[in-house]
Amino acid sequence: MNETHYYHAIAIATQSGYATMRKYRSVSGGSWEAAYHRLKNNSALLPEYAAPLPDPEAAYEHMASFGIRLILDSEKEFPEALRNIPYPPFGIYVRGGPSASLPSSRVTIAVVGTRRASAEGKKIARSFARELADAGCTIASGLAFGIDSAAHEGALDAGGVTVAILAGGLDSVYPHSHRALAERILASGGMLISEYPPGEPPLAYRFIERNRIMSGLSRGVLIVEAPESSGALATARYALEQDREVFVVPGAITSTHFKGSHTLIRQGAELVTSPDEILEAYGIEKNKCASGKRVVASPEEILVLKALTDISVPADVDKLIALTRLEPRIVNQTLSFLLIRGTIKESDGGYTI
Protein backbone atom coordinates (compact mmCIF):
# COMPACT_ATOMS: atom_id res chain seq x y z
CA MET A 1 0.00 0.00 0.00
CA ASN A 2 1.07 3.61 -0.49
CA GLU A 3 0.05 7.11 0.59
CA THR A 4 -2.93 7.25 -1.79
CA HIS A 5 -4.51 4.23 -0.07
CA TYR A 6 -4.28 5.82 3.37
CA TYR A 7 -5.41 9.26 2.15
CA HIS A 8 -8.46 7.69 0.49
CA ALA A 9 -9.42 5.82 3.66
CA ILE A 10 -9.20 9.01 5.76
CA ALA A 11 -11.13 10.99 3.13
CA ILE A 12 -13.96 8.43 3.24
CA ALA A 13 -14.15 8.51 7.05
CA THR A 14 -14.07 12.31 7.29
CA GLN A 15 -16.07 13.10 4.12
CA SER A 16 -13.01 15.01 2.85
CA GLY A 17 -13.46 17.78 5.42
CA TYR A 18 -10.69 20.18 4.42
CA ALA A 19 -9.79 21.56 7.86
CA THR A 20 -9.89 18.09 9.39
CA MET A 21 -7.70 16.56 6.69
CA ARG A 22 -5.19 19.41 6.98
CA LYS A 23 -4.98 18.95 10.76
CA TYR A 24 -4.38 15.20 10.48
CA ARG A 25 -1.59 15.64 7.93
CA SER A 26 0.02 18.43 9.94
CA VAL A 27 0.18 16.51 13.23
CA SER A 28 1.43 13.38 11.44
CA GLY A 29 4.48 14.94 9.84
CA GLY A 30 2.87 15.16 6.41
CA SER A 31 2.33 11.39 6.17
CA TRP A 32 -1.15 10.04 5.42
CA GLU A 33 -0.02 6.57 6.49
CA ALA A 34 1.06 7.91 9.89
CA ALA A 35 -2.21 9.84 10.17
CA TYR A 36 -4.21 6.69 9.39
CA HIS A 37 -2.48 4.58 12.03
CA ARG A 38 -2.78 7.38 14.57
CA LEU A 39 -6.54 7.56 13.99
CA LYS A 40 -6.88 3.79 13.91
CA ASN A 41 -5.23 3.55 17.32
CA ASN A 42 -7.30 6.37 18.79
CA SER A 43 -10.72 6.71 17.15
CA ALA A 44 -11.57 9.49 19.61
CA LEU A 45 -9.43 11.77 17.42
CA LEU A 46 -11.98 11.45 14.61
CA PRO A 47 -14.76 14.08 14.51
CA GLU A 48 -18.19 13.07 15.81
CA TYR A 49 -19.68 12.88 12.33
CA ALA A 50 -16.93 10.59 11.02
CA ALA A 51 -17.55 7.05 9.82
CA PRO A 52 -15.26 4.20 10.89
CA LEU A 53 -11.95 4.09 9.07
CA PRO A 54 -12.21 1.58 6.21
CA ASP A 55 -9.53 -0.89 5.22
CA PRO A 56 -7.24 1.15 2.92
CA GLU A 57 -6.57 -1.57 0.37
CA ALA A 58 -10.19 -2.72 0.05
CA ALA A 59 -11.45 0.86 -0.19
CA TYR A 60 -8.91 1.69 -2.87
CA GLU A 61 -9.80 -1.38 -4.94
CA HIS A 62 -13.48 -0.42 -4.71
CA MET A 63 -12.65 3.08 -5.98
CA ALA A 64 -10.58 1.70 -8.88
CA SER A 65 -13.49 -0.53 -9.92
CA PHE A 66 -15.28 2.64 -11.09
CA GLY A 67 -12.36 3.59 -13.34
CA ILE A 68 -11.37 6.32 -10.87
CA ARG A 69 -7.81 7.14 -9.88
CA LEU A 70 -6.55 9.31 -7.04
CA ILE A 71 -3.64 11.72 -7.46
CA LEU A 72 -2.10 13.38 -4.41
CA ASP A 73 -0.47 16.80 -4.37
CA SER A 74 2.89 15.12 -3.73
CA GLU A 75 2.77 13.27 -7.04
CA LYS A 76 4.19 14.42 -10.37
CA GLU A 77 0.83 13.95 -12.13
CA PHE A 78 -0.91 16.46 -9.86
CA PRO A 79 -1.88 19.55 -11.93
CA GLU A 80 0.79 22.20 -11.48
CA ALA A 81 -1.83 24.95 -11.73
CA LEU A 82 -3.42 23.77 -8.46
CA ARG A 83 -0.27 23.59 -6.34
CA ASN A 84 -0.03 27.27 -5.41
CA ILE A 85 -3.65 28.38 -5.11
CA PRO A 86 -5.04 29.29 -1.68
CA TYR A 87 -6.39 26.12 -0.03
CA PRO A 88 -5.16 23.70 -2.69
CA PRO A 89 -6.73 20.23 -2.63
CA PHE A 90 -4.60 17.53 -1.00
CA GLY A 91 -5.63 15.16 -3.75
CA ILE A 92 -8.02 14.90 -6.67
CA TYR A 93 -10.08 12.00 -7.97
CA VAL A 94 -10.02 11.65 -11.75
CA ARG A 95 -11.85 9.73 -14.45
CA GLY A 96 -10.66 9.80 -18.04
CA GLY A 97 -7.75 11.50 -19.75
CA PRO A 98 -4.18 10.17 -20.01
CA SER A 99 -3.28 11.94 -16.75
CA ALA A 100 -4.60 14.60 -14.41
CA SER A 101 -2.25 17.17 -15.92
CA LEU A 102 -3.99 19.14 -18.61
CA PRO A 103 -2.06 19.31 -21.90
CA SER A 104 0.71 21.87 -21.40
CA SER A 105 0.24 23.26 -24.91
CA ARG A 106 -3.32 24.27 -24.10
CA VAL A 107 -4.81 27.26 -22.34
CA THR A 108 -7.69 26.22 -20.08
CA ILE A 109 -10.68 28.56 -19.83
CA ALA A 110 -13.47 28.00 -17.31
CA VAL A 111 -16.89 28.91 -18.70
CA VAL A 112 -19.56 29.35 -16.01
CA GLY A 113 -22.89 31.03 -15.35
CA THR A 114 -26.42 30.50 -14.12
CA ARG A 115 -28.19 27.13 -14.11
CA ARG A 116 -31.39 28.93 -15.13
CA ALA A 117 -29.91 30.33 -18.29
CA SER A 118 -31.95 31.87 -21.06
CA ALA A 119 -31.87 30.35 -24.54
CA GLU A 120 -29.67 33.26 -25.64
CA GLY A 121 -27.28 32.77 -22.72
CA LYS A 122 -26.84 29.08 -23.53
CA LYS A 123 -26.31 29.93 -27.18
CA ILE A 124 -23.57 32.45 -26.24
CA ALA A 125 -21.84 30.00 -23.89
CA ARG A 126 -21.89 27.23 -26.48
CA SER A 127 -20.60 29.54 -29.22
CA PHE A 128 -17.74 30.93 -27.09
CA ALA A 129 -16.72 27.45 -25.91
CA ARG A 130 -16.85 26.05 -29.43
CA GLU A 131 -14.58 28.78 -30.85
CA LEU A 132 -12.17 28.66 -27.91
CA ALA A 133 -11.94 24.86 -28.16
CA ASP A 134 -11.50 25.09 -31.92
CA ALA A 135 -8.48 27.34 -31.28
CA GLY A 136 -7.00 24.66 -29.01
CA CYS A 137 -8.18 25.79 -25.58
CA THR A 138 -9.44 23.31 -23.00
CA ILE A 139 -12.88 24.21 -21.61
CA ALA A 140 -13.53 23.66 -17.90
CA SER A 141 -16.98 23.81 -16.32
CA GLY A 142 -19.17 22.12 -13.73
CA LEU A 143 -21.57 19.88 -15.72
CA ALA A 144 -24.56 21.73 -14.25
CA PHE A 145 -27.70 22.74 -16.09
CA GLY A 146 -27.68 25.95 -18.10
CA ILE A 147 -24.38 27.63 -18.96
CA ASP A 148 -22.16 24.77 -17.76
CA SER A 149 -23.67 22.10 -19.99
CA ALA A 150 -23.80 24.52 -22.93
CA ALA A 151 -20.04 25.16 -22.49
CA HIS A 152 -19.26 21.43 -22.48
CA GLU A 153 -21.45 20.94 -25.55
CA GLY A 154 -19.67 23.76 -27.37
CA ALA A 155 -16.26 22.20 -26.75
CA LEU A 156 -17.55 18.82 -27.96
CA ASP A 157 -19.03 20.49 -31.06
CA ALA A 158 -15.51 21.55 -31.98
CA GLY A 159 -14.07 18.10 -31.30
CA GLY A 160 -12.12 19.67 -28.45
CA VAL A 161 -11.20 18.81 -24.88
CA THR A 162 -13.42 19.68 -21.94
CA VAL A 163 -13.06 18.99 -18.23
CA ALA A 164 -15.93 18.74 -15.73
CA ILE A 165 -15.27 19.48 -12.05
CA LEU A 166 -17.91 17.84 -9.87
CA ALA A 167 -19.12 18.56 -6.33
CA GLY A 168 -19.53 14.90 -5.36
CA GLY A 169 -17.98 11.48 -5.88
CA LEU A 170 -17.19 10.43 -9.45
CA ASP A 171 -19.09 7.15 -9.10
CA SER A 172 -22.29 9.11 -9.67
CA VAL A 173 -22.87 12.03 -12.04
CA TYR A 174 -24.97 14.96 -10.84
CA PRO A 175 -27.36 15.94 -12.27
CA HIS A 176 -28.21 12.38 -13.28
CA SER A 177 -29.68 13.57 -16.58
CA HIS A 178 -26.15 14.62 -17.61
CA ARG A 179 -24.69 11.12 -17.43
CA ALA A 180 -24.69 10.86 -21.23
CA LEU A 181 -22.90 14.22 -21.47
CA ALA A 182 -20.29 13.01 -18.98
CA GLU A 183 -19.70 9.88 -21.09
CA ARG A 184 -19.26 12.04 -24.19
CA ILE A 185 -16.70 14.13 -22.35
CA LEU A 186 -14.74 11.01 -21.41
CA ALA A 187 -15.03 9.51 -24.88
CA SER A 188 -13.64 12.71 -26.41
CA GLY A 189 -10.50 12.63 -24.28
CA GLY A 190 -11.77 14.88 -21.48
CA MET A 191 -11.89 14.29 -17.74
CA LEU A 192 -14.14 14.32 -14.71
CA ILE A 193 -12.43 15.67 -11.58
CA SER A 194 -13.52 15.85 -7.94
CA GLU A 195 -12.02 16.52 -4.55
CA TYR A 196 -14.42 14.02 -2.97
CA PRO A 197 -14.20 10.22 -2.81
CA PRO A 198 -16.79 7.93 -4.43
CA GLY A 199 -20.03 7.80 -2.48
CA GLU A 200 -19.95 11.44 -1.38
CA PRO A 201 -23.12 13.35 -2.41
CA PRO A 202 -23.01 16.81 -4.04
CA LEU A 203 -23.94 18.82 -0.94
CA ALA A 204 -24.68 22.53 -1.38
CA TYR A 205 -21.45 23.85 0.17
CA ARG A 206 -19.37 21.56 -2.02
CA PHE A 207 -20.41 23.44 -5.16
CA ILE A 208 -18.70 26.53 -3.76
CA GLU A 209 -15.65 24.52 -2.64
CA ARG A 210 -15.19 22.92 -6.05
CA ASN A 211 -15.29 26.33 -7.77
CA ARG A 212 -11.78 27.12 -6.48
CA ILE A 213 -10.55 24.01 -8.30
CA MET A 214 -12.33 25.02 -11.49
CA SER A 215 -10.73 28.47 -11.51
CA GLY A 216 -7.43 27.08 -10.23
CA LEU A 217 -7.10 24.73 -13.20
CA SER A 218 -7.78 27.61 -15.59
CA ARG A 219 -5.81 30.54 -16.98
CA GLY A 220 -9.00 32.59 -17.13
CA VAL A 221 -12.70 32.44 -16.22
CA LEU A 222 -15.49 33.50 -18.57
CA ILE A 223 -18.76 34.49 -16.90
CA VAL A 224 -21.89 34.16 -19.06
CA GLU A 225 -25.24 35.31 -17.65
CA ALA A 226 -24.73 35.50 -13.87
CA PRO A 227 -27.50 36.82 -11.59
CA GLU A 228 -26.71 38.53 -8.29
CA SER A 229 -26.62 35.30 -6.28
CA SER A 230 -25.01 33.05 -8.91
CA GLY A 231 -22.34 30.57 -7.83
CA ALA A 232 -20.39 31.80 -10.85
CA LEU A 233 -19.57 34.93 -8.83
CA ALA A 234 -17.78 32.73 -6.29
CA THR A 235 -15.74 31.27 -9.14
CA ALA A 236 -14.84 34.81 -10.22
CA ARG A 237 -13.74 35.70 -6.66
CA TYR A 238 -11.56 32.60 -6.48
CA ALA A 239 -10.08 33.47 -9.88
CA LEU A 240 -9.07 36.94 -8.66
CA GLU A 241 -7.51 35.46 -5.49
CA GLN A 242 -5.58 33.05 -7.70
CA ASP A 243 -4.40 35.81 -10.06
CA ARG A 244 -6.49 34.53 -12.99
CA GLU A 245 -8.20 36.77 -15.54
CA VAL A 246 -11.96 37.23 -15.36
CA PHE A 247 -13.88 37.87 -18.58
CA VAL A 248 -17.58 38.79 -18.60
CA VAL A 249 -20.17 38.80 -21.39
CA PRO A 250 -22.55 41.74 -20.80
CA GLY A 251 -26.32 41.54 -21.15
CA ALA A 252 -29.43 43.69 -21.19
CA ILE A 253 -29.42 46.26 -18.36
CA THR A 254 -33.04 45.38 -17.57
CA SER A 255 -32.34 41.65 -17.10
CA THR A 256 -31.83 40.34 -13.57
CA HIS A 257 -29.92 37.43 -15.14
CA PHE A 258 -26.97 39.79 -15.73
CA LYS A 259 -26.93 41.77 -12.47
CA GLY A 260 -24.00 39.80 -11.12
CA SER A 261 -22.21 39.99 -14.46
CA HIS A 262 -22.53 43.77 -14.59
CA THR A 263 -21.30 44.09 -11.00
CA LEU A 264 -18.13 42.21 -11.99
CA ILE A 265 -17.61 44.55 -14.95
CA ARG A 266 -17.95 47.60 -12.68
CA GLN A 267 -15.39 46.03 -10.34
CA GLY A 268 -12.84 45.72 -13.13
CA ALA A 269 -13.49 42.42 -14.91
CA GLU A 270 -12.81 42.51 -18.64
CA LEU A 271 -15.90 42.96 -20.80
CA VAL A 272 -15.84 40.69 -23.86
CA THR A 273 -18.26 40.32 -26.75
CA SER A 274 -16.30 37.86 -28.86
CA PRO A 275 -14.12 34.78 -28.26
CA ASP A 276 -11.44 36.54 -30.32
CA GLU A 277 -10.90 38.99 -27.45
CA ILE A 278 -10.05 36.13 -25.09
CA LEU A 279 -7.76 34.49 -27.65
CA GLU A 280 -5.99 37.82 -28.16
CA ALA A 281 -5.45 38.16 -24.40
CA TYR A 282 -3.41 34.94 -24.47
CA GLY A 283 -1.77 35.48 -27.84
CA ILE A 284 -3.58 32.55 -29.44
CA GLU A 285 -4.21 32.51 -33.17
CA LYS A 286 -7.27 30.67 -34.38
CA ASN A 287 -6.54 27.03 -35.26
CA LYS A 288 -2.85 27.51 -34.46
CA CYS A 289 -2.78 26.33 -30.86
CA ALA A 290 -4.31 22.87 -31.15
CA SER A 291 -2.10 19.89 -31.74
CA GLY A 292 -4.87 18.51 -33.96
CA LYS A 293 -8.65 18.70 -33.96
CA ARG A 294 -10.43 15.76 -32.44
CA VAL A 295 -13.18 13.96 -34.27
CA VAL A 296 -16.50 13.76 -32.44
CA ALA A 297 -16.94 10.19 -31.21
CA SER A 298 -19.64 8.00 -32.74
CA PRO A 299 -22.14 6.15 -30.49
CA GLU A 300 -20.18 2.92 -31.04
CA GLU A 301 -16.90 4.61 -30.11
CA ILE A 302 -18.48 6.02 -26.97
CA LEU A 303 -19.58 2.52 -25.93
CA VAL A 304 -16.10 1.05 -26.52
CA LEU A 305 -14.32 3.92 -24.76
CA LYS A 306 -16.74 3.75 -21.83
CA ALA A 307 -16.03 0.02 -21.48
CA LEU A 308 -12.26 0.62 -21.50
CA THR A 309 -12.64 3.47 -18.98
CA ASP A 310 -14.84 1.47 -16.63
CA ILE A 311 -12.63 -1.63 -16.42
CA SER A 312 -9.37 0.41 -16.49
CA VAL A 313 -7.31 -2.65 -17.55
CA PRO A 314 -6.39 -3.92 -21.03
CA ALA A 315 -9.32 -5.67 -22.74
CA ASP A 316 -9.34 -7.93 -25.78
CA VAL A 317 -11.94 -7.94 -28.55
CA ASP A 318 -14.05 -10.69 -26.97
CA LYS A 319 -14.23 -8.79 -23.68
CA LEU A 320 -15.28 -5.59 -25.47
CA ILE A 321 -17.96 -7.46 -27.44
CA ALA A 322 -19.38 -8.79 -24.17
CA LEU A 323 -19.27 -5.38 -22.46
CA THR A 324 -20.69 -3.31 -25.33
CA ARG A 325 -23.04 -5.94 -26.79
CA LEU A 326 -22.07 -4.72 -30.24
CA GLU A 327 -21.57 -7.03 -33.22
CA PRO A 328 -18.00 -8.36 -33.58
CA ARG A 329 -17.67 -6.61 -36.95
CA ILE A 330 -18.66 -3.25 -35.43
CA VAL A 331 -16.27 -3.66 -32.47
CA ASN A 332 -13.34 -4.50 -34.77
CA GLN A 333 -14.15 -1.58 -37.07
CA THR A 334 -14.49 0.81 -34.14
CA LEU A 335 -11.18 -0.33 -32.64
CA SER A 336 -9.48 0.29 -36.00
CA PHE A 337 -10.78 3.87 -36.15
CA LEU A 338 -9.74 4.57 -32.55
CA LEU A 339 -6.25 3.14 -33.15
CA ILE A 340 -5.76 5.25 -36.28
CA ARG A 341 -6.76 8.40 -34.37
CA GLY A 342 -4.46 7.53 -31.47
CA THR A 343 -7.34 7.47 -28.96
CA ILE A 344 -6.47 3.94 -27.84
CA LYS A 345 -3.37 1.74 -27.96
CA GLU A 346 -2.87 -1.99 -28.37
CA SER A 347 -0.62 -4.15 -26.21
CA ASP A 348 -0.18 -7.87 -25.55
CA GLY A 349 -2.95 -7.71 -22.95
CA GLY A 350 -5.46 -5.97 -25.21
CA TYR A 351 -6.64 -2.41 -25.77
CA THR A 352 -6.38 0.58 -23.40
CA ILE A 353 -7.14 4.28 -23.69
Image (cartoon, helix red, strand yellow):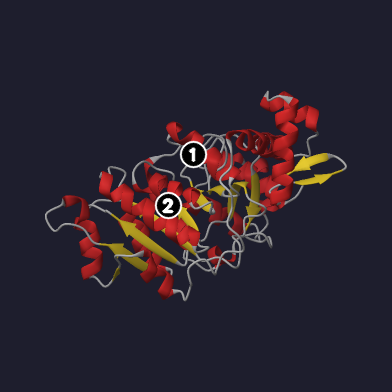
Instruction: Return the x and y of residue 304 as percentages of the image width and height.
Output: 67, 35
**Residue at image mark 2:** 209
Q: Secondary structure at mark 1?
A: helix
Residue at the image point whose x is 34% and y is 66% from the top: 247
Q: Nearer the viewer, residue 207 or 252?
A: 252
Q: CA distance from mark 2 to mark 1?
A: 23 Å
In the image: residue 91, left or right of residue 285? right
Name which residue type carries label 2.
Answer: Glu
Q: Where, by quadrant of the figure, is residue 106 drawn?
A: bottom right
Q: Where, by quadrant of the figure, is residue 25 drawn?
A: bottom right
Residue at the image point whose x is 41% and y is 39% from the top: 203
Q: Where, by quadrant of the figure, is residue 320 drawn?
A: top right
Instruction: Return the x and y of residue 110 as percentages of the image width and height.
Output: 43, 58
Instruction: Return the x and y of residue 239 as percentages of the image width and height.
Output: 40, 65
Q: Earlier in the sequence, mark 2 or mark 1?
A: 1
**Residue at image mark 1:** 181
* Residue lying at the far left of the rendered structure: 254
Q: Please say if the residues under marks 2 and 1 sit with CB atoms less than 8 Å apart.
A: no
Q: Nearer the viewer, residue 297 or 31?
A: 297
Residue at the image point whose x is 32% and y is 53% from the top: 124
Q: Secondary structure at mark 2?
A: helix
